[in-house]
Amino acid sequence: MAPRANWKGVLKVAELSCPVSLFTAASTSERIAFHTLNRQTGHRVQRQFVDSETGEPVEPADQVKGYEMGQGDYVVLEPEEIAAVIPESDKVLDVQAFIKCDDIDDTYFDRPYYLAPSNPVAQEAFTLLRESMRSKKVAALARAVLFRRLRSILIRAHGNGLIATTLNFDYEVRSAEEAFSEIPEMKIEGEMLDLAKHIIRTKKGKFDPKTFDDRYEAAVAELVKAKLEGREIKAPRKARAEQGRRSHGRVKGKRESFVPLR
């Protein structure tokens, strides 16, 4: 079954136009998710918005957005006022320029999407653009209204298709200067540098995402399976160690019996 497109439009490069579809490339929807339940009844609980001062429930029709100007001072914005400033989408991925693939700082990378021709007629133009970019080793900088915002998008050749990465706005990316400000200028040379280079050579490898296991996800899946099957659930090692520390000094009559930790 073909995946569902997140967005459909036209990829436009000067006079060349190509109908395309945008698909999610990375998603957290496969992760295990929990619901919050009432321990007494087993029923799911519901969230309810209440007035922070009166404690009274507030119906959806009475809820509005507010921009805080100061402590307890807000500018109230009605839904129709917010809707009026959302940019209108023309469903066009408009390529502004082509740049070298390594010219952009990946700190600006936000979210990746797969870009594919949306119908068989578009495949020739799509392939022409993809192979031209690949041969020149360039990426396309485009702009489009995606998900209610005008976004900058980096488009690169990727296998048989293209990958479109939305970019963070400049104001969203924090300067590295503050994080690195206390790192002194140091000159490393001689044996220490040779040793570091040797370690790097011996640890040389290839990127294989299949080797990166999500241990938390696997542990939660096993926990759920164990409870469904009625198996005894072993306490985590850290919890067992904590329990051992609490029982380190036990009283038998008037003597203390110290139990060594294993």
Image (cartoon, rainbow, N blue to C red):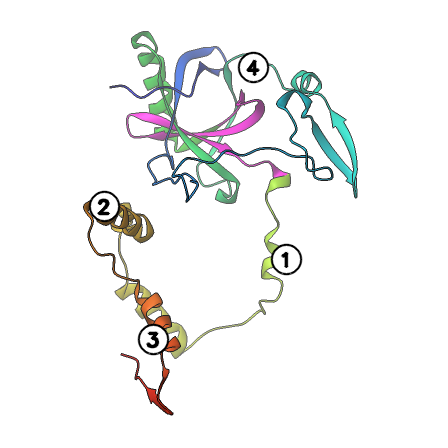
Horizontally, is 231 left or right of 76 in the view?
Answer: left
User: What type is the residue that disc 2 sits on?
Assistant: Lys
Q: Nearer the N terminus, badge 3 or badge 4?
A: 4
Q: Nearer the N terminus, badge 1 or badge 4?
A: 4
Q: Which residues are magenta?
A: 141-170
Residue in the foreground of this view, choosing between 133 and 115: 115
User: What type is the residue that disc 4 sits on?
Assistant: Ser
Q: Nearer the N terminus, badge 3 or badge 1?
A: 1
Residue that badge 3 annotates: 244
* Alpha carbon distance from label 3 to label 1: 44 Å
138 in the magenta segment: no
Q: How many marks?
A: 4
Residue that badge 4 annotates: 89
User: What type is the residue that disc 3 sits on?
Assistant: Gly
Q: Is residue 223 above or below residue 61?
A: below
Q: Quadrant of residue 186?
A: bottom right
Q: Nearer the N terminus, badge 2 or badge 4?
A: 4
